[in-house]
Image: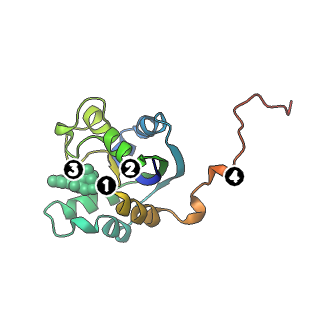
Amino acid sequence: MDLERTLVLVKPDGVQRGLVGTIIGRFEATGMKIVGMKLMQVGEGLAQRHYAEHEGKPFYEGLVNYITAAPVVALCLEGPDAIAITRKLMGATNPSDAPPGTIRGDFGVEISRNLVHGSANADDAVREVGLFFSDEELIDYSRSNDVWIVSDEG
Ligand code: UDP
Ligand code: MG
């Protein structure tokens, strides 16, 4: 299985409702690694580039207003099949179609306030991670040492 990276956003409704920890926890508990993470306010330009595929659709303007209205938490997650696993944990776009156990199924009621974004495919993932993170902001864990064993530093 190929190691993949994907972009996740805890959208403004998730941040405002105090669900950041809960939502990140669902992803983290799978074993996927957080390789990038930041709280940020999305500007209109970034929102338009991120959602370019939806330009012209009836919900586009509302979508850009929603994602720029308040801070989001952006995450880059890494793991085998990270793109599909992330989408599975999110549930269907419309919370009413998302089963219990998924983030949207457990915490959402409305398609336009569905709490979380996850890249849809490999091309989108590369593009979206690049929009939200610079290379320097993404962690290479092969350069890290384990610190979860009892410290020998006293
Ligand atoms: N959206 C909406 N109304 C719709 C369809 C989509 O408000 O009828 C919003 C919703 O926030 C969704 C985002 O637009 O998450 C992007 O839509 P997409 O079809 O890419 O869904 P996703 O990939 O987020 O599941
Ligand atoms: Mg999408």
Dot 2 or dot 4: first in sequence order is 2
Q: CA distance from mark 2 to mark 3?
A: 22 Å
Q: Amino acid at mark 4?
A: Arg
> Which quadrant of the rendered structure holds the C terminus?
top right
Residue bearing the label numbered 3: 112
Q: CA distance from mark 4 to mark 1?
A: 29 Å
- Label 2: state its secondary structure: helix
Q: Amino acid at mark 3?
A: Ser
- Label 1: state its secondary structure: loop
Q: CA distance from mark 3 to mark 4?
A: 40 Å
Mark 3 residue crowding within 10 angstroms, few (<14) / some (14–19) / many (20+) = some
- Label 3: state its secondary structure: loop
> Is label 1's Cβ within 8 Å of ligand 2?
yes
Dot 1 or dot 2: first in sequence order is 2
Q: Amino acid at mark 1?
A: Ala
> Is label 3's Cβ within 8 Å of ligand 1?
yes
Residue bearing the label numbered 1: 120
From the top left corner, tell me how far across and down residue 117 is, in percent. 34, 51
* Mark 1–mark 2 CB contact (< 8 Å): yes
| Residue 125 vertical placement versus 113 (above, below) | below
From the top left corner, tell me how far across and down residue 60 is, in percent. 20, 63
Checking the image for residue 83, the label placed there is 2
Dot 2 or dot 3: first in sequence order is 2
Q: Residue at x 46, y 54 (%)?
A: 5
Task: Select label 3 or label 4 by which is in front.
Answer: 4
